[in-house]
Amino acid sequence: MLVALFAFMSGPANAQMVHADELDQPPQVIKQQRPSYPRDMRRAGQMGAAVVEFIVTKEGKVREPQSVAETHAVFGEEAVRTVAKWRFSPGMKEGQPVYTRMVVPIYFVISTHQEEDLGGRVQAVITGFPPKSPPKVPEGFHYDTAPVPQRYQPPVWPWIDGVPVREGRADVFYGIDTAGQVVQARIVEATNDAFGKAAQAAVECWQFKPAKRDGNPVPALGRREVQFTLYLSPDAPELRHLRAIETGKANYAKANELDAQPKVIAREPARYPMALIQEGPDGSAVIECIIDRTGRVCLPRIVEASREEFGWAAATAASRWRFAPPTVNGQPVDVKVRIPFEFKGADQNAG
């Protein structure tokens, strides 16, 4: 099957996707419920948590909830199920409702007084930053208030032997500066090299409220385990496409059948790979992906890259793009496309 390489059109300004911290008025909860405690976990007295990322539409509905970090899969499952039922007043930017990307932690505790303590422990597991800096950390990286994650980036699933794979993990050592930006990241160990590179590219996109010492922002060093087997709802587009690929039943519309060229309604630039910053070369990559019938980008795959690091950075960025749903004769369809990325070493960004 031929896959088209498009010069993608941009959508209307009011279709943009923004993060809650970029809004004039973030979404406000108008309907919310607490999750049910998984029975076996309650019986065992086991506390836990999950961090759920989701989109609040312009109508205030929750779409595409997924666990981006969890202490156990059952907590991720219940957290996603719960958040899917929430309702919001939409986020506002320049007087207009917008699609908003949000992240919330969901805690499972036996009694409410345990939640604060659990929050710090879970955050340490998820980010690799304990509540207080370990004594072996160099003096310049000591803090008394741990960094707080503001934006997560789930890793893309590596393609291995022609199939996207999610049964893996990786440990990544990384550092953030006094603004909370990740400024270094390296793989400590991983299921294999592909999982390591995917995890590293994701961690480089995280953002934090900075660590503090005596009330002042300070740099910090952390080490986190990135899991690829995070809970997704049974109707998640990624799972549907994965099953189709594994069974040989994948079917995509042809580019010349589409009613219109795919239209981007939300995109994020690729992060220039930190491993290449000192050398600073220009680079390029081409990412093949599925634009789902909902407009979501699924299962991005590197097909060309001048350097491997550019490929992973581009695939990670592509996973955040959003399109108007592609159609054939007015009906939403899945289509496979290729997205080109160019990297400039001088200003270290791409698109």
Image: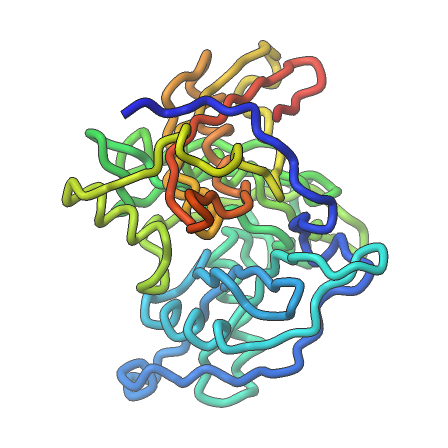
Image position of 108 with respect to 350: above or below: below
Q: Is residue 152 left or right of residue 245?
A: right
Q: Hey, which quadrant is residue 276 in on the image? A: top right
Q: Residue at x 54, y 87 (%)?
A: 112
- The extreme left residue here reads 247
| Residue at 49% in and 26% down | 339
Query: Residue 95's image quarter?
Result: bottom right
**Residue nearest the viewer, comparing 141 with 178:** 178
> Percent position (x, y) of residue 275?
53, 22
Is 99 situated above or below 73? above
Q: Is residue 211 left or right of residue 155?
A: right
Residue 138 appears in the figure: no
In the current view of this chain or complex, which residue is farthest to the front? 329
Location of residue 77 in the rendering, given as x and y in whole percent from the top left corner = 36, 70
Which is more toward the observer, 70 or 255?
Answer: 255
Q: Position of residue 117 (x, y in %)?
A: 55, 75
Which percent across, then down, holds residue 239? 30, 53
> Is the residue 342 above or below the residue 242 in the image?
above
Q: How is the image coloured?
A: rainbow
Number of callouts in the render?
Answer: 0
Q: Quadrant of the C terminus?
A: top right
Residue sitting nearer the eye, 53 or 303? 303
> Which residue shows up at 34% across the image and 66% down it?
72
Q: Is residue 91 visible?
A: yes
Q: Quadrant of the N terminus?
A: top left
Dividing the picture into quadrants, the one containing residue 338 is top left
Left or right: residue 269 versus residue 287 is right
Q: Is residue 322 above or below residue 98?
A: above
Residue at the outermost right position: 94
